[in-house]
């Protein structure tokens, strides 16, 4: 008689452990009936790869911006502490079998916890990074570099690397002079599998070429980032020559081929499937970067016909990848023993079914408590409640606040002829959940509004540049007819050639003026490229030859999002100030955030020139 599946509550209460906990997480014991029978069982070995990706500084199931346990509509849980419990359960389930634990990058950025130990109490000045503590306790074998590993500069990254008990891999993070990898390109592990036999596994690490754009200020002249396919073609044969029976790629690059930066680089951003298709000898790819849930996907290699396994375990520790490989022992004509891959498959385990691992949780508890105290410290007040919930469809004061502080900082730092130019600023709605309450404002409130570690620059642009920039930004909106009412999802996050899964909110920028308003309409009944109407500064139409200084973040100035003009425009301000910290410092210095000082309705959505209604 079958037994009922244990409930999540029972698992969390500690009433279910071991195999039952795995079953609750979604684990299904694979059947290898087609690969294994009584005659061949002794000549076959199962090897397991456990994988995570895009942990982004999450140790606990905790939302630092909301100051409570993380939750979403799917009731996922997050954090490496919970993943650690699943890892231990899998190791117990397959005790004695060969197993690797890998990560596909983006580890040290993404939460106030990660930010605090990079900027407030930096590990470069002492102390162990909380993610290093946690990952060492889990017992990873290797991890690929993610693009966000470079956000805090190479000194922080190298310090983090030194604190790990396993290698950070990056075959396509190379020295610009020698062309050789600046990090270990691969890792090889040999397993003893009984009767004197050994299985050798090679793990190739590949990071994202977009780092050259997104973190230009940190890597330019210091590292270069060639394509994943190009570097894999160099190193997979080397792993085979070293006798690797199995080659696994850990790639911080999505499975659905696309590039958010268009043709700004000759190498695609999301190229995992291209590696599988074009590089012979790859058996499987642990995929990262795209924050997708891919339990199992096979991509056929165009040269060999091999079906290459791809698996992506979502992000933030919501899932653990379990990748299985069945190897068959055979002998060549010369009598030399070799292993042949005869079966593979993968699945994802859900971390919301288990408790956090006690050892991992305890190791980081003091640092977590320090950060919780820091982000909840009051820094000022807001004269009224402000929200970013509708920032993608209307001009809202909380985004005006970002633009005001950015433009004010740039204006104060200008000199020479640029100081006489009107100052504009761009800002995107990074987090629709962001809000300021009426009354006390904390570090957490500001950090929730500006969630990225961007720095501020000022560039000189023409009126034609401003118009082109806004037209590019307006690609974010879907084309509609009529004036509505529409649901927000009916007009936002349009699919484009560079965003096949929909344009993200962070690639919709509004532009505002500092001393005088910059006003415009976005007509989303028109085709892309012809949507900006009535563009004016201080009530006067903006001419192509007009000159402005525009406050932008380093992501945009480096080419992120493919926006025109700003990546090549003259830089007239660059003090490497982090924008989030500028916002925190402004509130601390001024005490009160009063929207009457900076907020105005400068842009609106229209259809056929008429205002639209969006619910």
Image (cartoon, helix red, strand yellow):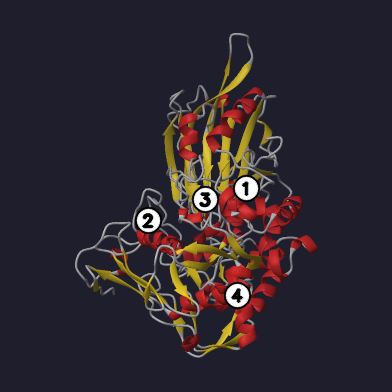
Q: CA distance from mark 1 to mark 3?
A: 10 Å
Q: Residue at x 41, y 67 (%)?
A: 73
On the image, the x and y values in percent for residue 244 come to 63, 27
Residue 393 seen anywhere in this rendered image of the structure: yes
Residue 11 seen anywhere in this rendered image of the structure: no
Residue marked by disc 2: 502
Name the quadrant of the C terminus.
bottom left
On the image, the x and y values in percent for residue 371 come to 66, 73
* Residue toward you, 244 or 169: 169
Residue marked by disc 4: 409
Residue marked by disc 3: 289
Q: Residue at x 50, y 25 (%)?
A: 38
Sequence-wise, the earlier of marks 3 and 2 is: 3
Q: How many marks?
A: 4
42 relative to 364 in the view: left or right: left
In what element is the residue under mark 4? helix
Q: CA distance from mark 3 to mark 2?
A: 16 Å
* Residue toward you, 145 or 143: 145
Q: Residue at x 42, y 44 (%)?
A: 256
Sequence-wise, the earlier of marks 1 and 2 is: 1
Residue sitting at the far top: 333
Residue marked by disc 1: 145
Q: CA distance from mark 3 to mark 4?
A: 33 Å
């Amino acid at each position: 008689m079958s037994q009922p599946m244990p409930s999540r509550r029972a698992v969390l209460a500690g009433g279910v452990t071991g195999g039952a906990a795995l079953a609750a997480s979604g684990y299904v014991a694979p059947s290898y009936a087609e690969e294994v029978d009584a005659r061949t069982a002794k000549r076959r070995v199962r090897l397991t790869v456990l994988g995570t990706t895009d942990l982004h500084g999450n140790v606990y199931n905790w939302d630092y911006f909301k100051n409570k346990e993380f939750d979403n509509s799917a009731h996922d849980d997050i954090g490496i502490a919970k993943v650690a419990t699943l890892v231990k359960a899998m190791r117990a389930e397959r005790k004695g079998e060969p197993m690797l634990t890998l990560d596909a990058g983006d580890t040290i950025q993404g939460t106030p916890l990660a930010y605090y130990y990079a900027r407030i109490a930096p590990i470069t000045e002492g102390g162990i990074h909380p993610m290093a503590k946690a990952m060492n306790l889990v017992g990873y074998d290797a991890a690929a570099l993610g693009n966000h590993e470079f956000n805090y500069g190479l000194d922080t990254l190298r310090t983090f690397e030194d604190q790990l008990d396993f290698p950070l891999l990056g075959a396509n993070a190379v020295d610009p002079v020698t062309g050789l990898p600046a990090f270990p390109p691969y890792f090889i592990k040999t397993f003893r599998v009984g009767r004197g036999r050994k299985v050798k596994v090679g793990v190739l690490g590949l990071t994202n070429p977009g780092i050259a754009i997104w973190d230009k200020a940190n890597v330019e002249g210091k590292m270069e980032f060639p394509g994943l396919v190009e570097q894999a073609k160099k190193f997979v044969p080397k792993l085979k020559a070293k006798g690797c029976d199995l080659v696994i790629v850990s790639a911080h690059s999505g499975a659905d081929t696309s590039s958010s930066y268009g043709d700004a680089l000759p190498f695609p951003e999301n190229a995992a499937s291209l590696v599988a298709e074009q590089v012979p000898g790859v058996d499987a790819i642990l995929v990262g970067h795209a924050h997708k849930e891919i339990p199992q996907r096979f991509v056929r290699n165009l040269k060999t016909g091999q079906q290459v396994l791809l698996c992506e375990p979502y992000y933030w520790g919501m899932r653990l990848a379990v990748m299985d490989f069945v190897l068959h022992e055979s002998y060549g004509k010369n009598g030399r023993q070799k292993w042949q891959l005869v079966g593979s498959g993968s699945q994802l385990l859900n971390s919301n079914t288990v408790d956090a691992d006690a050892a991992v949780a305890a190791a980081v508890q003091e640092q977590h408590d320090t950060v919780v105290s820091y982000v909840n410290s009051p820094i000022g007040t807001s004269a009224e409640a402000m929200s970013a919930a509708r920032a993608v469809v209307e001009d809202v004061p909380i985004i005006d606040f970002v633009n005001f502080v950015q433009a004010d900082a740039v204006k104060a730092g200008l000199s020479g002829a640029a100081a006489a130019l009107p100052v504009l600023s761009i800002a995107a709605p990074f987090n629709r959940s962001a809000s300021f309450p009426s009354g006390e404002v904390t570090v957490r409130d500001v950090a929730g509004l500006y969630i990225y570690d961007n720095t501020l620059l000022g560039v000189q642009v023409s009126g034609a540049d401003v118009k082109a920039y806004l037209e590019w930004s307006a690609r974010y909106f879907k084309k509609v007819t009529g004036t509505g009412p529409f649901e927000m999802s009916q007009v936002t996050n349009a699919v484009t050639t560079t965003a096949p899964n929909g344009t993200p909110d962070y690639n919709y920028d509004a532009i505002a003026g500092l001393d005088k308003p910059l006003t415009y309409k976005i007509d989303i009944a028109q085709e892309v490229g012809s949507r900006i109407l009535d563009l004016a500064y201080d009530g006067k139409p903006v001419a192509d030859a007009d000159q402005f200084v525009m406050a932008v973040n380093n992501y945009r100035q480096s080419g992120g999002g493919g926006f025109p003009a700003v990546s090549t425009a003259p830089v007239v301000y660059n003090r490497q100030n982090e924008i989030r910290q500028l916002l925190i410092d402004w509130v601390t210095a001024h005490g009160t955030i009063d929207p009457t000082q900076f907020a105005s309705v400068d842009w609106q959505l229209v259809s056929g020139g008429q205002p639209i209604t969006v619910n």
